[in-house]
Amino acid sequence: MLLPAAARALPCAPPHKPTLLQAARTLLAALQSRPFAASTAAARAAAPGLPAAAAAAASTSPGAPATLSSVPIKSLQQAITPQVCQHLQERGFAVVDNVLGGSVAAALREEVSALRRHMHKNCTHLVQGGATGLLEKEHVFEAELIQQQTQALAPLAAQLQHDSTLRVMLSVLMPELRLHSQAIKLQYNAGRGGCFPMHFDTDASLDTRKVTTIWYLNPGWKPGDGGELRLYPFPEAPVDIEPVNDRMVLFSSQHMLHRVLPSAAERYCFTIWLSEGGGLHRPGGAAVERDRAELRRALSSAEPLGTGEAWRLALHPELRKHAAKWAYRQEWERSIRESHPTGPALDQALQTFHQEIAIIGRALAPLLPAMAAGPPPGGLQRPAWF
């Protein structure tokens, strides 16, 4: 049983300090009127009210063009509001519609379509015993924009690749983020049931991706076409987001469980991953060790834990992903079957999944009765997403 949640509702929020918005937009205007190789010092001079981390993020776009005349970047600036950022911060996701306009969305769709013959099949990465295997998805194709050939064939998308607007606005309005770089992947789903299994985009132990942004390019999408993005903001209920034209969805790369539902029609989009700099951060120290020792003691209990304690532990940063996988284990298995062709590779993936679920079930045994009964009457404290 999961908490109810309203899909796509952006609550009214107290605005952040106007000086931050002004500083971000002043900085962006300065950067777009000069080469993107501006130094951090120049960025701070352009907007003295900007936090140092955001100024640094804005000054690291080597090789980008001096202007982005074909893409209405100002519209993108205006789309990232305090309300959007608060929803992203508190709920782990946010949805913004009509960001760049229909004509720009159509041009971007044409670029993705023109790249179809240069794309490769999207694959699920299977990690077992220290080795990584690839399991192809059916009817889903992609191309990475980091490749020079791809940028030459998709100049509008390449402009977005080199623009710092998203990084700056999010870093200013969400101080816990220090976004430093980004990467874009273009994607074409041929329909015929093409979909993605449930997954997290990354883990803090793997890379520094923080925010996933998906931009949809599907004019005329209608119910029945499929291809919705399903988010699982555990412990709240799943949220389905329709892939309608010029819609931008942002969510936590590390903590938002998600999948793509089977698509009956062609589906176009591109994904922007926004990452922090400075390398991987591995928490440690005496406080962390005490916290882990407490977890081990609680999970070694021979008796089921009380509702409040069990849910508190289920949402602990080191257990939360495992608890979500257990809670959605049946739907997770179904999503694996739907996303891949039958054969030995799929059989191996399912075997690995069942082994993982069995391990999680044993490890979280003291929590499972309370999780099955649902959250405590007073509700739960929302988990941190970033």
Image (tube, helix red, strand yellow):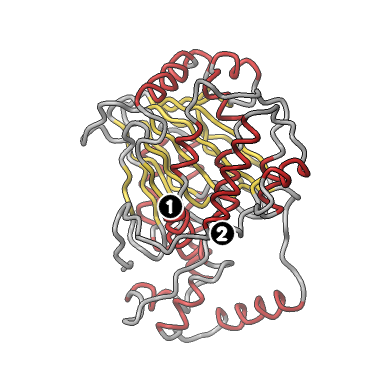
Q: Give residue 242's mark.
A: none
Secondary structure type for disc 1: helix
381 left or right of 173? left
Quadrant assignment, res 342: top left
Q: Amino acid type of disc 1?
A: Val
Q: Position of residue 334 (x, y in %)?
A: 35, 47
Q: In which quadrant will I find the C terminus?
A: bottom right
Residue sitting nearer the eye, 328 or 93: 93
Task: Categorize mark 1 by other alpha carbons within 10 Å: few (<14), some (14-19), many (20+).
Answer: many
Report which residue position mark 1 lands on: 84
Residue sitting nearer the eye, 363 or 188: 188
Q: Amino acid type of disc 2?
A: Phe
Report which residue position mark 2 lands on: 386
Please indicate, yes or no, whether residue 291 appears anywhere in the rendered image. yes
Secondary structure type for disc 2: loop
Decide: is 98 above or below 3: above
The residue that appears at 69% across and 47% down in the rendered structure is 55
Q: Position of residue 12 (x, y in %)?
A: 35, 60
Residue sitting nearer the eye, 283 or 307: 283
Please indicate, yes or no, whether residue 325 appears anywhere in the rendered image. no
